[in-house]
Amino acid sequence: MNGMKRKSIIIEIVFIVYFFCNSLFSQTTNSSISSGTMSSNVIVDRVAYYKNMFGNVHQNPLKTSNVLTTLSCGQPIQIIKVLDNSVPNDWEKVKVGPYIGFIKKDFLLDKRPKCFQDSYSKFFDKFNFDIAELYYWAKLYDQYLIDKSGLK
Amino acid sequence: MKQLFLGYIFVCVLAFNIGSSSFCADGQALTTDEKVFQAINFDGVKDVLKKDKLEQEVQTTKTVIAKKIDKAVEDNRNKYQIPDIEFWSFFSELWLIKNAQILQWDISSPDYGIELSFKQFLEKFGYYEKPFKILLVNSPNIFHIALPTNGESAILLLSLPFLKALDLSKLEISLLLFEDFIREEFSFFKNYVESNELKALLGTNFLGKDFNKDLFNKHLDKYDQLLFDKGFSFQQQFEVTNKVGAVLKSDMKYWDAYFALIKKIDLIVKENPQYSRYNKIFPSPEFQLGWLKPEKDKKD
């Protein structure tokens, strides 16, 4: 009888430890699982939306760095709060699906944008874009030198 | 036995009652529904329903459902809308995508700081809050151009081989971009590409109609025609050069730089056969110099 009790206590402890660890890791994400270039722990901060037609999530905060995945307009993106100064001011560290990478801050909006491919979905579909064309469209926004003249 | 007898009596009375009211005034037999209808005082029930506002509730629900149906129909119809204002930025980017390999814009290039320099240039001459996107291409087939857009953000193309051949400074690059920026303000490119057929199609809905994809492809070809073959007219070049000259006259340092830039282009166009086609696309640097020169210098 005592042996049974001990067994159930051990099982309970194992469950408690498992759930504690699980909840801890769901809030914090170790960035070393992405590019391996960062060492600090980061927290998922908020959700933002991709605003251009198509775009890329990069492995590093550089537009020439490897592409992890491609995004389309309106796609929700988890923004990761970085606790150190390892990310340049004009980039955000993000989590998209299983990928953790970087997107230019200017390409994100807090509210879901009005997207061309949603507003004119049937018109857009008629062009039957293949994967190569979608790749180029995403790449185009990496290649653009984007700016805006200021206020008077 | 007594209970059975009483039950029999009850059934007989009930049958008599129903039987007595089972005939209309004209003697026809009534159905069960009609009998129930007669038994209930509907005027009284109607009053109760009115007091409960159930009729209003039914009406409101009907209106809500009708609106939802209308919205679903409208949403479906909107999906077939052909863009109007938003068309040109989409179409220009589509041309860039389709011509990615010819234009060779998918390249790594160092940060020249062109965008910052052009931003400051625009601000200096009072062009505030003007968004722009510069795309460097590694092709000598194109020199510099602003593609048609919906006015939201200019798309400016610059050829790296052309910049390198001319060995342009940041100021000279900004002047070249500014010339394209002004050309786009005149909508010369858009006016060339846009036919009456396309104009009539933009902003319409193609639900239940055939989608004329060939028409859009033909108009994409017009981009190629203008940029690689036909180019702009003398009149258009004259208007652009005059406008740029007029804007730059507020600071002669910039006007002189523009004049020197056109001279530089004129020289390379005449000396380097690779760039002789420039004259056809932007006719012509030699004429531009003439248009820019003040009247008294022309007499000299």
Image (cartoon, grey):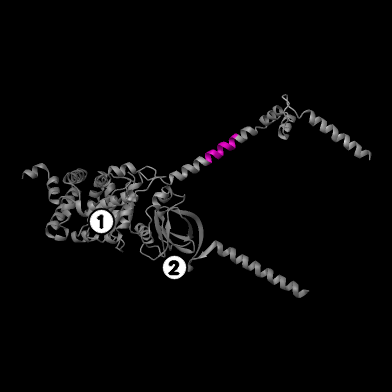
Q: Judge whether residue B62 is colored magenta.
A: yes
Other-residue count near label 1 (Cα within 10 Å), few / some / many at <14 / 14–19 / ≥20: many
Q: Against B272, is B92 above or below?
A: above
Q: Against B103, is B175 above or below?
A: above
What's the mark number on residue B158? 1
Q: Which of labels 1 and 2 is toward the front?
A: 1
Residue bearing the label numbered 2: A35
What is the chief secondary structure element of the magenta stretch?
Answer: helix
* Residue B112, x across and y down, in percent: 28, 59
Label 2 chain ID: A
Classify residue B204 as left or right of residue B138.
right
| Residue A128 visible here | yes
Classify residue B141 as left or right of residue B273.
right
Report which quarter residue B293 is drawn in.
top left
Q: Residue furthest front?
A: B27
Q: What residue type is labelled 1?
A: Leu
Label 1 chain ID: B
Name the residue nearer the viewer: B108 or B16.
Answer: B16
The residue depicted at 20 percent of the width and 53 percent of the height is B229
